Image (tube, helix red, strand yellow):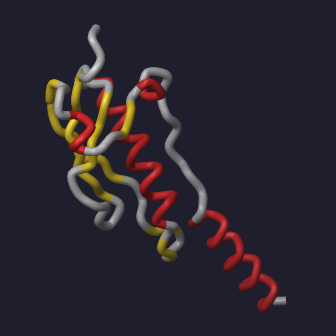
């Protein structure tokens, strides 16, 4: 019986490690994630640092899920700064990433 509990616990932890927890806001849906080369004509409006869980139940989460959540958090944060575009400045480290925020579209 305890072996079944261990298997179920392990499967649940793997499932949770793959989940995405961060919803994009209505305004954040309009924010783009671009590269530095693509924002040459845009106005820089600030910088944001976002963080999400890198581990769940002691297990490392999938890098793709972490990156997607970080992009979503940055997009949501860009709205608060009056931006419509974010550019990651570095690769994620332990669920943390820094982005520059730009306004590329006319208001």
Q: Judge by depth and name the residue closer to the eye, 81 or 104.
A: 104
Q: Quadrant of the N terminus?
A: bottom right
Please report the residue visible at 41 percent of the width from the left and 65 percent of the height from the top: 54
The part of the image, by quadrant, that contains residue 94 is bottom left
The part of the image, by quadrant, that contains residue 33 is top left
**Rendered position, 8 above or below 20:** below
Q: Quadrant of the C terminus?
A: top left
Residue 91, percent across and down? 28, 61
Residue 97, percent across and down? 28, 54
Residue 100, percent across and down? 20, 40
Residue 59, percent across and down? 51, 76
Q: Which residue lies most toward the right here?
A: 1
Please report the residue visible at 28 percent of the width from the left and 45 percent of the height from the top: 35
Q: Judge by depth and name the residue closer to the eye, 90 or 5.
A: 90
Residue 32 relative to residue 35: left or right: right
Residue 23 relative to residue 77: left or right: right
Number of on-image labels: 0
Please report the residue visible at 56 percent of the width from the left and 51 percent of the height from the top: 20
Q: Judge by depth and name the residue closer to the eye, 96 or 87.
A: 87
Please report the residue visible at 39 percent of the width from the left and 54 percent of the height from the top: 52
Residue 15 relative to residue 59: left or right: right
């Amino acid at each position: 019986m305890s072996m079944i509990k261990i298997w179920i616990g392990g499967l649940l932890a793997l499932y949770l490690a793959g989940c995405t927890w961060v919803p994009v806001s209505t305004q954040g849906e309009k924010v783009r994630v671009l590269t530095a080369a693509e924002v040459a004509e845009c106005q820089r409006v600030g910088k944001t640092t976002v963080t999400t869980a890198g581990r769940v139940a002691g297990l490392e989460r999938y890098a793709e899920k972490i990156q997607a959540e970080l992009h979503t958090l940055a997009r949501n944060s860009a709205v608060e700064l009056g931006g419509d575009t974010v550019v990651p400045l570095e690769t994620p480290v332990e669920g943390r990433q820094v982005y520059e925020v730009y306004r590329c579209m006319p208001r």
